[in-house]
Amino acid sequence: MAESKIKEGVTAPDTNELNLTSASRKKSFNLPKLLRVVFLTIGLLFLYAPIVSLIIYSFNGSKMMTVWGGFSVKWYFELFADKQMMDAVLTSLIISFCAASMSVIIGTLAALVLVRISNFKGESLFALFITAPMVLPEVIVGLSMLLLFVTLSQLIGWPQRGMVTIWIAMVTVTAAYVTVVVRSRLKELDYSIEEASQDLGAGPVKTFFFITLPSILPAIVSGWLLAFTLAMDDLVITSFVAGPGSQTLPMVVFSSVRRGLNPEINALATIIVFIVSLCTFFYWLMRVRKEKRLRQDMKLAMQGK
Amino acid sequence: MVTENSKVPDNTKSNGANVEKRRVSTDIKPPVKNTPKDRKPLLVIKDLTKAYDANLAVNNVNLTIYEGEIFALLGSSGCGKSTLLRMLAGFETPTSGAIYLDGQDMTNVPPYKRPVNMMFQSYALFPHMTVEQNIAFGLKQDKLRKAEINARVEKMLKLVHMEEYAHRKPHQLSGGQRQRVALARSLAKQPRVLLLDEPMGALDKKLREQMRLELVDIVESVGVTCVMVTHDQEEAMTMAERVAIMDRGEFIQIGGPREIYENPNCCFTAEFIGSVNLFESTLITSDHTGSIIRSKDLENEIRLDIDVDLADGMEVFVALRPEKIYIERTFPVDENGKELTANYAIGVVENIAYMGDISIYYVRLKSGKIVITTLPNVDRFNVGLPTWDDQVYLSWDPESCVTLTF
């Protein structure tokens, strides 16, 4: 308090001048400010208006997409009664869950190799190879996967195209993302905590599970979520490697939209939007609270309490 | 204000008193050797070498550390002190040589099987564990019973005065508190040797001075043998019983703090520890009656009372610590009031650095050599003391000089 008062006192003679400049600056900034608001509104509208209209039309009583036929939730009931759609949701969930889990294991191992093995000769080459699926066009990845699976099944009779092939294809792509996320976390991790663990008598395996893993867990979780989301809505690669009996949600939605707009899809989209926003909101809330607590803790620690 | 002014002493008096107080008699004791020979050797390092490609980080080092001693490895960054410590902990494998602990070969034992614990420079506390869990971690690895672990953790918390913080996470602690937890964690397993890597490196200056003595107290109360690495000479001198000065992977000198300060064995040590005036000189004569040395920087001879035991005509360096040089404005005299004929120099004050407790004088001699000397600021107003561009007489006692050959 005392310090701020002193500072005020020091700057007091200049306040007139300061006020003048800030006032004139305000004036000159009025127009850009208006423009900023306009652009922001346009941008937000561009992003969210389609989603809002989609949500509104999911409650449309009429089958026609362009005509408002009164409020109704019948499309939701129809959606849940649609066996093909429900099967696709289940298939997608299973594949995404398995793909995310597998890619977390592979991605974490790859990140560990890249960061922890000192003077690893082919490090940059290996890093390039493991992250290549991120930048390769999906069409090429999908096509090459398809060729591989066809050749393999001709040679050894495995795999038959279906959920397994989709799963393998998804893991190759999403593992790259997990590697990037976990690698950056591992890089900033203080290596001495692992040394400290060994110094205190824990072997390398114990050290990994009790010290390293808990420290990189946030990165692994976000890697898993990222992989899950990517696998959930992939259409291109999945279409290449899917078999006749394995229709994922994006495939079903895409093919039904091609047959004509269907209000059922609106209902499905509304549910997905609702779930995603709920998750995002809680994640945000948790983060804000955690950060606030961390700041408070640090402040207390600094004061020596 | 009035009382302060009245305290200003008279010029000549203060100067005279100052000099009289500083002039010491020739009754000197031999420097105390701190080598604890009566103690049992605990850690023996034999011909230890660590090479990174062509670079020798540690070059053929031999060292014996005794039970219960606090030993400091002192050197500038890159001198190999940290590599040596990491080899003791087991994080680095020596290229050649061996490490014996209690007579047992430890050279290739992995870190998790050594009865040695380390306190890291960054403290390396586990961020996802509480203070209590951090301290208990090492004990859990030993498969101790739960009750015993709890008792030991409690004892450790008490030792470092952190009982109230047992359930805090590391980020909820201040720097000093984190250090205490790190110390407690590394002491919990009752290691044979405690390794400290730059123990005060992460603390600010004020806290550092306070923690130095506290850390020594704790370590001594436990009675553990301690090897520390530091680049801070003050830290090494105040905390350790013996200090090893390292440069380029080799030990330059090993000895007690007083020994390495007062009896450096080479110019490197003399210049590394504290500041020193080095005079390039030639030994004229040396026998049991004393030695005469002539420096090209000094107009007068340096006369020592002792036999330096070197061949006449040899090139030597005379090292003289700044605080052992008297600076006066009158011609220096000995105890009997006779004017000095040797061991003095005439110069002009070129610069004064006021440090608060002392002032450092930079005196330029006729030869152009700058001699550093210090004066304690006993008096608040420094009346009567030499000032800029004053002609001054520098003098020293014969026993203040240390003769070095390299």
Image: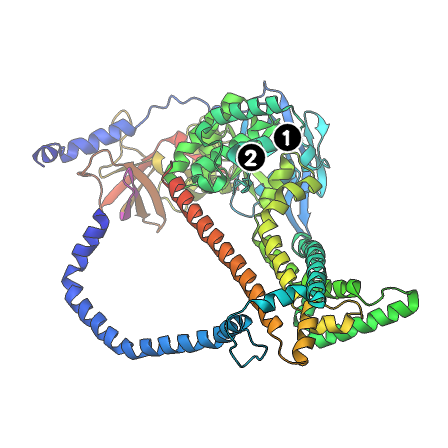
Identify the secondary structure beneath mark 2: helix
User: Mark number for residue B91?
Assistant: none
Q: Which residue is mark 1?
A: B140
Residue A96, x across and y down, in percent = 69, 61
Q: What secondary structure characterizes most of the magenta part?
A: strand
Say how the picture is coloured.
rainbow
> Across the whole image, how many numbered discs are drawn on residues?
2
Q: Specify whether A184 is left or right of B296.
A: right
In the image shown, does B285 or B26 lie closer to the viewer? B26
Q: Chain of mark 2?
A: B
Identify the secondary structure beneath mark 1: helix
**Mark 2, other Cα within 10 Å: few <14 / some 14–19 / many ≥20:** many
In the image shown, does A254 or B45 lie closer to the viewer? A254
**Furthest residue in direction left, as rendered:** B2
Q: Amino acid at mark 1?
A: Lys
In the image shown, does B291 or B9 lie closer to the viewer? B9
Above or below for A14 versus B193: below
Q: Amino acid at mark 2?
A: Asn
Residues in magenta, as a range: B349-360
The image quadrant of residue B61 is top right
Residue A114, x across and y down, in percent = 67, 57
Residue B7, x across and y down, in percent = 13, 32
Q: Specify whether B215 is left or right of B370.
A: right
Q: Which residue is mark 2?
A: B134
Residue A40, x across and y down, in percent = 40, 74
**Mark 1, other Cα within 10 Å: few <14 / some 14–19 / many ≥20:** some
